[in-house]
Amino acid sequence: MPQLLLKNGLVIDPASGLEAKRDLLIEAGRIASLSAKISPPPGCAVFDAAGLWVFPGFIDMHVHAREPGAEKAETLASAARAAAAGGVTSALLMPNTSPPMATAALLKKYRARAAGLPVNFYFSAAITAGRAGKRLSGLAGLKKAGALAFTDDGACLEDGGLFRRAVKTAARLRLPLLDHPELSGLSGAGVLNRRVPGFRLPAIGSESEVFAVLRDIMAAADCGPVHLQHLSLSASVGALRAAKAAGVPVTGETCPHYFTLSDRDLDPRDANFKMKPPLRSPADRTAVLKALADGTIDVIATDHAPHERFLKAKGFLKAPFGVIGLETLAPLCVTELVFNNRMPKLRLARLLSANPARLLGLRRKGALTPGFDADITILDPRAEHRVPERFFSLSSNSPFKGRRLKGWPSAVISRGIFIFKDGRVIC
Ligand SMILES: [Zn+2]
């Protein structure tokens, strides 16, 4: 029975509220015990975690792995390497592949392909047939085939009647329904938050997100739980806060770019700053930070969206929306939230592990409780370096290239096995 002992790390466990120096013993892929001092059993491997932060493995519930359909941008295998390097031990994959994850047969095929990978990949399925927004896909059958959530991400399900039926069905099936809140008619051909003098780039007004958020909250109040994806605006998080206070079953996520950057940081010549929703105003960024701190936002997810270099080279107007995020998740959270905004590490563990595990119904994940899967992300708070030009991802469309960040993963363990150590992915 393989054993591994992590010695002297600062253990951060959201389930017990523990943040203290502890030894942690792993046995047969599970957490065996956690205590102030554990002597290594005979033959047990030992990892010295002194000075390091030991988190439950990060669970990223918003990842585009691009397989099938765009394997030059990313594959399941390359996404797994990027996830491992980023400290992400579990990820929920989005269904806007080509063809879309909207049938049980396709879902089963790609679940089988992902099964051998060192990172736990879970699949969401499209809410509507062909992700076309016209009629519901066979949601019960997709659940039976292994879907863990429903979403038409990449697009909003704008038909309000159909959306409410989807929310009711997902509630009955007890699976989360995730919405990309955006009314396309209001976004139009917009590519950024506000016009930049000297550039002919149309804007995406904030109402395209806010009206969809309000619609979703009203549906949640009547029909069942709704999870709001990638929130970017002060008005959105304000509405989420009020809805939660009123007892509406609604949750929300944001992404590192929305709490790290604003539209003032954007280079309109560089399409690596182009994503949906767009980078918003500094006041919106501050509101998102506050909503992360006070628990209004439940989850940090990356919306990892790889695109081939030639596509992003088409310029801000024509390039596709989206940025990669798996490999910069940890240092952006540590630098921006823990160091710059003094977020307690326990709250970060809730946002990155405990809450997504709860939302997705992942038992035995999201905490360091004995008996739970030994998925562990070990960060080095002193490790400081620039975001490189090249990534484990097949794509490199990051707006953070060259940025100095602190708090990079030192080692990552999935089901008791190292999948990243000393800067190398082991899978
Ligand atoms: Zn989306």
Image (cartoon, helix red, strand yellow):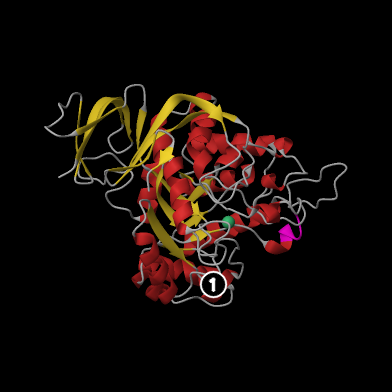
Cβ of disc 1 within 8 Å of ligand 1? no
Relative to residue 123, is residue 364 drawn left or right?
A: left
Image quarter where ligand 1 lies = bottom right
Image height check: is 165 above or below 45? below
Q: Start and end of the magenta stretch?
A: 186-190
Q: Who is closer to the viewer here, 192 or 206?
A: 192
Q: Does the magenta portion include 188?
A: yes
Whether residue 249 is visible here, answered yes or no, is no
The answer to whether 422 appears left or right of 62 in the picture is left
| Residue 241: in magenta span | no
The residue depicted at 44 percent of the width and 59 percent of the height is 225
- The residue pinned by badge 1 equals 99
Residue nearer the viewer, 36 or 226: 36
On screen, residue 80 above or below 144: above
Residue 408 appearing in the image: yes
* Residue at (37, 48) in percent of width and height: 427
Where residue 97 sits: x, y (%)? Answer: 54, 66
Tell me the amino acid under the disc marked 1: Pro
Q: Position of residue 324 (x, y in %)?
A: 57, 47
Q: Main secondary structure of the magenta part?
A: loop
Q: Residue furthest left?
A: 42
